[in-house]
Image (tube, helix red, strand yellow):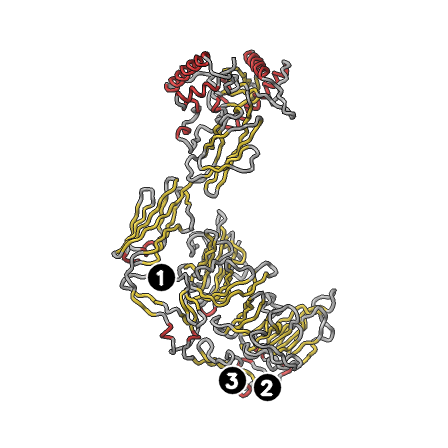
Amino acid sequence: QLFSSVEFGRRWLLLHEGVAPNRFYWSMMGSGREPDLVHLEAKTVDGHAQYITCKMQNCSEATRSKPFPGYIDHNSLIVQDDYVFVQLTSGGRPHYYVSYRRNAFAQMKLPKYSLPKDMHVISTDENQVFAAVQEWNQNDTYNLYISDTRGVYFTLALENVKSSQGLEGNVMIDLYEVAGIKGMFLANKKSDNQVKTFITYNKGRDWSLLQAPDTDLRGNPVHCLLPYCSLHLHLKVSENPYTSGNIASRDTAPSIIVASGNIGTELSDNDISMFVSSDAGNTWRQIFEEEHSVLYLDQGGVLVAMKHTSLPIRHLWLSFDEGRSWSKYSFTSLPLFVDGVLGEPGEETLIMTVFGHFSHRSEWQLVKVDYKSIFDRRCAEEDYRPWQLHSQGEACIMGAKRIYRKRKSEKKCMQGKYAGAMTSEPCVCTEADFDCDYGYERHSNGQCLPAFWYNPSSLSKDCSLGQSYLNSTGYRKVVSNNCTDGVRERYTAKPQQCPGKAPQGLRIITSDGKLTAEQGHNVTFLVQLEEGDLLRSLIQVDFGDGITVSYANLSSTEDGIKHIYQNVGIFRVTVLVENSLGSDNAVLYLHVTCPLEYVHLSLPFVTTKNKEVNATAVLWPSQVGTLTYVWWFGNNTEPLITLEGSIAFTFSVEGMNTITVQVSAGNTILQDTKTIAVYEQFQSLRLSFSPNLDDYNPDIPEWRRDISRVVKRALVEVSNVHNLCISSKHILVAVLPGLPTSAELFILPYQDATGENKRAAADLEQISETLIQKLNQNLVHFELKPGVRILVHAAHLTAAPLVDLTPSHSGSAMLMLLSVVFVGLAVFVIYKFKRKIPGLNIYAQMQNEKDQEMVSPVSQRESIPNVPQRELMSPEQLVDEKLEVQPIG
């Protein structure tokens, strides 16, 4: 929850719930922004993330704005200076969007095949974005990219910058922006498994290695020749304000850089020393052989160094000449375990505070050190000298000659407010002031030429005949570069009249990049054109459901074309763009679905060994769109995948077998599992019940399963009373759907653990006859509820092995066949007149568990509720089926 207070914390107002930690921004001052506007990333009810803005005094639903259309990735909102960044992943790839000065969002354009995995915004100073991008083939390094003013088009500044994991799992890029000098960065680049430190003075346009000191701390010469040997620095900055990191610089001391590092072929964690540069990184001096914390006082006029050690200390070092010489001072009478050092606010201060403890058991001690007494006067004008910023002798940096005022090293006076004054004079533009434009790459001869994937003519795609656009020369001036004249005209993009072009490269996509949509919900289509006269093109969109719309020009479709599909299915969406010079078309196949809520597997309870059985997946709702069915049979580890909801199969092994079907609809997967008994032969008996049972029959699967279990228990109990010794494994009871309530009783040749049949075929007939006798004697009953007794009756006996056991067809068999034909025709006629014979036994629908309102999407005939499969067969099919259900004898 995010709260705000306008009464200094006395009362708090709830702004929003579900706000992402550290993803809220307030009082982002600058041109065109409101001081009381809050930017936040909030979680929606369905778990998505959204970028929201609102006033701090009122953040109700009615006053909230959503500057970015649609959802964003979690923990991706960044508001920094004039820029707002969000991330949206689609198709497995992250896409990055930027808003400059709170205008509409645009997708950030990196080189086409950078394929970023991760991105970090390093700097947004001076109306430009410096970003670190981890590309598809990088693991522990990032590439540095620099943008145009709007933060949209990025070009490569430096490859393979080293990265590491912070203490909290955050990514740390080995890049340091030097304070006080715009455009100056230090970076550790990894090449051939070696990490080396590079420096740039022009925002990544040019990089060079650091020149090592000429001598070491003792004055001995250092033999280190570029590019084989150089100075390498650790660039980690401390997040703790009470401790210093590996490197430090200050805005009020623009030429002074203090850092830890080593001299050699690569950066190392061994033999670390401290180095200082007082000319903005051109030359370096070794100041300590061990790591120290360095504090800037008096705007860099005084440097205070304190040794990094776990032992107690009582001395520190001071330098009044930018680190050229150091004096040892005592700051406490007793050695102190130093925990941190803090300077007073303002770089002109001469007061510092050291805090620590005298022993591991003592409380914290604060030691305040004031160096004012060291100086007897403030600096005057004659105490300063001019110093010109340069890069290895080149005075023109970022298109200007900048001259700073520095205190003379021999003068010992307090600077106060006079330090840091600067004058600047523009330089004449040269090729060095221009970087390669987006889509161009610098070659060995220094020229910027188009990359293999870039088509320069695409720059004119967003304009119409009669308008003009900026035609790139392949170069763009480094942002914040102040050079004038010279080659500026030659390298600056030229206005050019838009050519009339036929439409080319037409695409139609959905706003979220998906090819699925939900029935009854808005779908937003985006029409994109690589080339063509946009304002003079006619656009026609056919949604594939009988609805077509037309637009006079592409600009009217910038916010997307919205459409709602009322039916499910696969729709062919076509778009046609044409003008006087030609036309282009594109097609998108959209799968419109509705949520799948329920899956029921329909199949017989019992079947005969090696006999083909049909299984059907019944869905609710029946029409949900494109589906995939995954079938699992018994103990098979490999599933069968189909696009149809029905399947035929056989079982070659007797016993109980399971069948599972999984139905995939979009992001939803539902499944149902059923058990089927498989035997060589069995007996079947239709059961009926007292009419009063119908009053309590809700006709749902759960009720039928419970009644089946009760009837089975009653049959086992009555058999045991009369010494039949029928096990519950011998019988199976299935209550059938519909009214009047009826059930099917199966008498099975149960097998024990040894695989031997407990009952032979003759035993099954004897059990059937006995059970019929007991049923006819009203001995099988159960109590549904107090006072409600239900009798179970034998309705119709069809005990059979379900296979033709005769070795060959005989005359009697043919006679029986003809008889069956007539019987089948009679059944068919009866069905046509919608009359039913009580007790008619249908094996193909032994387990029709689907509810009356359910409809199978596989076959139209299955949409008829409560109609057994037998009644939907042709007379010829009925004759064939009747031949298989002839009882023995």
Residue on which disc 1 sits: 458
Mark found first going from the N terminus, 2 or 1: 2
- Tell me which residue sits at (61%, 60%) in the image: 167
Q: Is residue 603 visible?
A: yes
Q: Position of residue 723 (x, y in %)?
A: 64, 14
Residue 648 lies, in percent from the top left, at: 47, 30
Q: Which residue is mark 3?
A: 386
The type of residue carrying mark 1 is Ser
* Residue 337 occupies quadrant: bottom right
Residue 865 vs residue 814, the one in the foreground: 814
The amino acid pointed to by label 3 is Pro
**Which amino acid, by three-letter code, is at mark 2?**
Lys
How far apart are the alpha carbons under marks 2 and 1? 61 Å
Above/below status of 204 relative to 520: below
Position of 887 relative to 5 (above/below): above
Query: Residue 256 falls in which quadrant of the image?
Result: bottom right
What x and y, as percent, mark residue 5?
52, 59
> What residue lies at 34% left-to-right and 45% top-to-bottom?
543
**In the image, is 463 to the left or to the right of 268?**
left
Can you identify the residue that label 2 sits on? 411
Q: Nearer the viewer, residue 26 or 853?
A: 853
The mark closer to the camera, 2 or 1, is: 1
As rendered, which of 505 and 821 lies closer to the eye? Answer: 821
Q: Is residue 348 visible?
A: no
> Would you say the residues marked 1 and 3 are in contact, meaning their CB atoms lie under 8 Å apart?
no
Q: Secondary structure at mark 1?
A: helix
Q: Position of residue 622 (x, y in %)?
A: 42, 34
